[in-house]
Image (tube, helix red, strand yellow):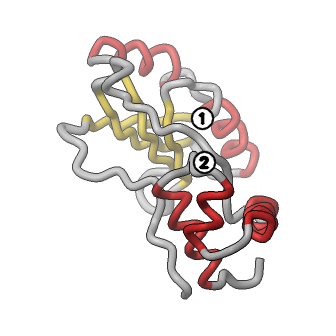
């Protein structure tokens, strides 16, 4: 997509508030006919502006009460090293987010664990077994202050 217009922005803002809104209600909120809204939505999806729809689950409600932020250093940053690490980390079910970083560490991970013993299991079975890892530095979140699913959509 080249540029988002005010209607696209209104669609995106509305969907961020209620991803389960019907097309008819969405169309009414943004001032379009249902068919025009459906076409706009299809374009936003196909262009990759909308990457998907999903429920935001509560880790706490699912008994994952601990969040670990893990810094990983690899033995090098060769393409093969990075791709092997990334393929392996994608298989770890407790890794919620993984970023390739600039700076002191190569990757930062956000991990959900049930408790400290569960994190120890994840560390032993998954993190320590990841290819090319030379250093793992873990920190534990004391309290979640903010967790935004998206940024505010604007016309810039």
Q: Estimate the x, y position of residue 74 in percent, counting from the top left.
A: 54, 42
Q: Are marks 2 and 1 in contact (CB under 8 Å)?
A: yes
Which residue is found at the position 80% from the left and 65% from the top? Answer: 35
> Which label number is shown at residue 76?
2
Q: 17 or 112: which is nearer to us?
A: 17
Task: Say left or right for 145 vs 38.
Answer: left
Q: Residues within 10 Å of mark 1 (few under 14, many from 20)?
A: some
Q: 126 or 154: which is nearer to us?
A: 154
Q: Residues within 10 Å of mark 2 (few under 14, many from 20)?
A: few
Residue 119 visible in the current orientation: no
Kindly state the secondary structure of the residue where label 2 is placed: loop
Residue under label 1:
132
Q: Quadrant of residue 24?
A: bottom right
Q: 21 or 114: which is nearer to us?
A: 21
Q: Quadrant of residue 29?
A: bottom right
The tally of labels here is 2
Q: Quadrant of residue 31?
A: bottom right
């Amino acid at each position: 997509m080249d540029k988002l217009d005010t209607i696209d922005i209104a669609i995106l803002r509305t969907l961020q508030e209620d991803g389960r809104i019907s097309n008819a209600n969405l169309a009414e909120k943004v001032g379009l006919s249902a068919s025009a809204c459906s076409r706009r939505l299809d374009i936003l999806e196909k262009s990759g502006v909308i990457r998907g729809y999903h429920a935001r689950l509560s880790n706490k409600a699912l008994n994952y009460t601990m969040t670990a932020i893990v810094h990983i250093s690899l033995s090098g940053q060769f393409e093969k090293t990075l791709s092997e690490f990334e393929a392996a980390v994608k298989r770890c079910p407790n890794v919620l987010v993984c970023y390739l970083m600039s700076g002191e560490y190569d990757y930062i991970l956000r991990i959900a664990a049930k408790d400290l013993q569960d994190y120890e299991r994840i560390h032993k079975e998954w993190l320590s077994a990841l290819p090319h890892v030379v250093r793992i530095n873990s920190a534990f979140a004391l309290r979640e202050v903010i967790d935004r699913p998206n940024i505010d959509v604007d016309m810039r």
